[in-house]
């Protein structure tokens, strides 16, 4: 039995807004967002780029994290990927 990987992601839109979502196929989902077919939100606001991704082994945990990230302020989201990019440089 295949075990899915789930991804929670934050993308930046052309107007500076952020969109948070969850998927099991991050590459396909990003392509959908780029084409304006990923969600009503990104089709309206445009896709600028992927800012943040977390991987999970089950959908429940991924959904819980998605909800948590959706409650983050803009400043807290930006601090999250700033922290992660600094960690990856060390």
Image: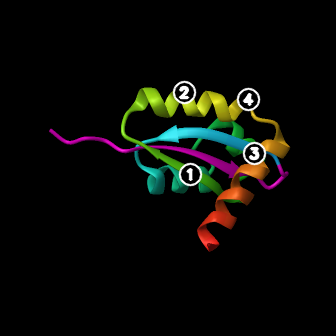
The secondary structure type at the circle numbered 4 is helix
Q: Is residue 5 left or right of residue 38?
A: left
The range drawn in magenta is: 1-16
Any magenta on residue 7?
A: yes
Q: Quote the CA–CA distance across marks 2 and 3.
A: 16 Å
Residue at 69% x, 44% y is 42
- Residue 53: mark: 1
| Residue depicted at x 65% and y 58% | 84
Crowd class of label 1 (few under 14; some 14 to 19; many from 20; radius 10 Å): some
First reached walking from the N terminus: tag 3 or tag 4 = 4
In the rendered image, the vertical position of residue 81 relative to residue 71, given as above or below: below
Q: Position of residue 60 (x, y in %)?
A: 43, 26
- Determine which residue is flagged by label 4: 71
The residue lying at 84 percent from left, 51 percent from top is: 16
Residue 77: image tag: 3
Q: Quadrant of the C terminus?
A: bottom right
Among all residues in the image, which is located at the extreme bottom?
Answer: 89
Q: Are marks 2 and 1 in contact (CB under 8 Å)?
A: no
* The quarter of the displayed image where residue 64 is located: top right
Residue at 61% in and 56% down: 34
Q: How would you rate the neighbour count of disc 3 (Cα within 10 Å): few for under 14, some for 14-19, many for 20 or more?
A: some
The colour scheme used to paint the residues is: rainbow
Dot 3 falls on a residue whose secondary structure is helix
């Amino acid at each position: 039995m295949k075990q899915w990987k789930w991804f929670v992601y934050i993308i930046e839109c052309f107007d500076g807004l952020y969109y948070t979502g969850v998927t099991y196929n991050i590459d396909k989902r990003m392509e959908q967002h780029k084409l304006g077919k990923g969600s009503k939100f990104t089709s309206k606001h445009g896709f600028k780029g992927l800012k943040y991704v977390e991987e999970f082994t089950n959908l429940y945990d991924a959904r819980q994290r998605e909800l948590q990230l959706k409650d983050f302020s803009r400043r807290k989201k930006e601090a999250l990927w700033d922290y992660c990019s600094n960690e990856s440089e060390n």
